[in-house]
């Protein structure tokens, strides 16, 4: 099996984990919690793929154990602090890199060859026709980011974000609970975000969207692609995806 994509993905997650570890040191713990949770979910998804979906696999067990620490008495198990969790997960990812690099973990590569990534479901979206489109766009956004195509990754993440917010607002209007005037189709991306927040449909996660993400529609050509002069960094694309994940949890809390 081609392991290079897995190694690249592991390396990105490790680097991001180290950045987050520094954030937990420099900033109040609460301000870094959302970003750590998104990163942790990405790590769990990759570990599941490498373990072939088996919770009994050594990598899955190591990841689960990374979320817990022993008390000072050595008896009960307590939740670890965010900083400890990040450090331990980074260590587990490093063990995954070592196993794949040395080729001495056939159970990982063999099982993951048969395991397809679990698609993100959009069953909470009221318009059923949009669900498969959103699933593909969400997966394509991740693939573009992994391939280093940050422009495409950002556009797809923002498109999914805008679509799910619009669907939520439209459903609210259809059920007689609209609080805003005018046709939603005529609203800007910013207006849809603000309206969804004021309606209580989503929380304040969109505050972290970078300027290029907020203006992505205005910066795109007739084909929906960003103009050549528009610069998008990996950080921009990553933030857009993190915000999308937060909003998806707002709209689909049972996920």
Image (spheres, rainbow, N blue to C red):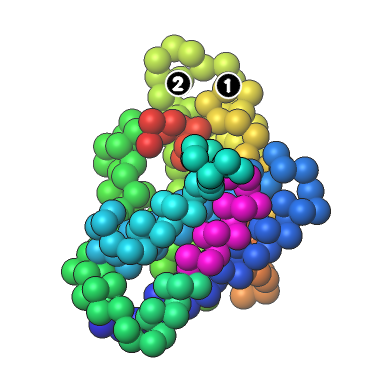
Q: As drawn, which residue projects farthest toward the left?
A: 114
| Residue 83 inside the magenta-drawn segment | yes
Asked which quadrant contains residue 187, the reply is: top right
Q: Percent from the top left, x then y, of residue 56?
A: 26, 56
Which residues are the magenta region? 80-93
Instruction: Check whether the beta carbons of the residues at disc 2 and disc 1 lie within 8 A of each other.
Output: yes
Query: What residue sits right under mark 1 in the picture?
Result: 199
Q: Which residue is mark 2?
A: 172
| Placement of 173 over or under 61, stated as above or below | above
Residue 140's spot in the image, x, y percent? 39, 63
For the N terminus, give its image quadrant. Answer: bottom left
Residue that appears at 28% across and 54% down: 55
Q: Residue at x 53, y 44 (%)?
A: 74
Pick the front one: 105 or 120: 105
Give the mark nearer the N terminus: 2 vs 1: 2
Coordinates of residue 24 in the picture (x, y in percent): 72, 51
Q: Is residue 211 within the magenta segment?
A: no
Q: Residue 14: x percent and y percent? A: 56, 69
Please give the name of the residue rendered at 80% of the width and 53% of the height, measured from the top-left corner: 26
Q: Residues within 10 Å of mark 1 (few under 14, many from 20)?
A: some
Residue 192 appears in which quarter of the rendering?
top right
Q: Which mark is residue 178?
A: none
In this view, the residue farthest toward the top is 176
Q: Is residue 106 left or right of residue 142?
A: left
Q: Is residue 3 above or below residue 55?
A: below
Residue depicted at 27% across the width and 41% down the height = 129
Q: CA distance from mark 2 to mark 1?
A: 9 Å
- Residue found farthest to the right: 26
- In terms of secondary structure, what is the magenta stretch mainly? helix
């Amino acid at each position: 099996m081609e392991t290079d994509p897995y190694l690249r993905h592991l390396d990105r997650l490790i680097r991001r984990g180290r950045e987050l570890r520094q954030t937990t040191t420099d900033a109040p713990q609460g301000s870094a919690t959302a970003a750590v949770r998104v990163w942790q979910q990405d790590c769990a998804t990759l570990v599941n793929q490498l373990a072939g979906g088996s919770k009994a696999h050594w990598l899955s067990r190591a990841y689960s154990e990374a979320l817990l620490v022993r008390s000072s008495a050595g008896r009960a198990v307590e939740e670890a602090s965010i900083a400890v969790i990040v450090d331990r997960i980074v260590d587990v990812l490093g063990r995954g890199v070592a196993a794949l690099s040395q080729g001495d973990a056939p159970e990982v590569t063999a099982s993951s060859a048969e395991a397809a990534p679990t698609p993100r479901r959009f069953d909470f979206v009221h318009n059923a026709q949009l669900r498969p489109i959103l699933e593909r766009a969400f997966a394509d956004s991740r693939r573009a980011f992994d391939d280093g195509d940050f422009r495409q990754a950002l556009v797809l993440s923002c498109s999914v974000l805008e679509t799910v917010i619009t669907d939520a607002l439209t459903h609210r209007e259809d059920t007689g609970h609209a609080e805003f005037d005018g046709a939603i189709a005529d609203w800007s991306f910013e207006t849809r975000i603000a309206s969804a927040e004021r309606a209580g449909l989503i929380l304040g996660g969109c505050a972290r969207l970078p300027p290029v993400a907020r203006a992505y529609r205005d910066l795109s050509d007739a084909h929906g692609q960003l103009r050549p002069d528009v610069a998008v960094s990996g950080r921009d694309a990553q933030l857009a995806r993190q915000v999308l994940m937060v909003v998806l949890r707002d709209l689909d809390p049972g996920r």
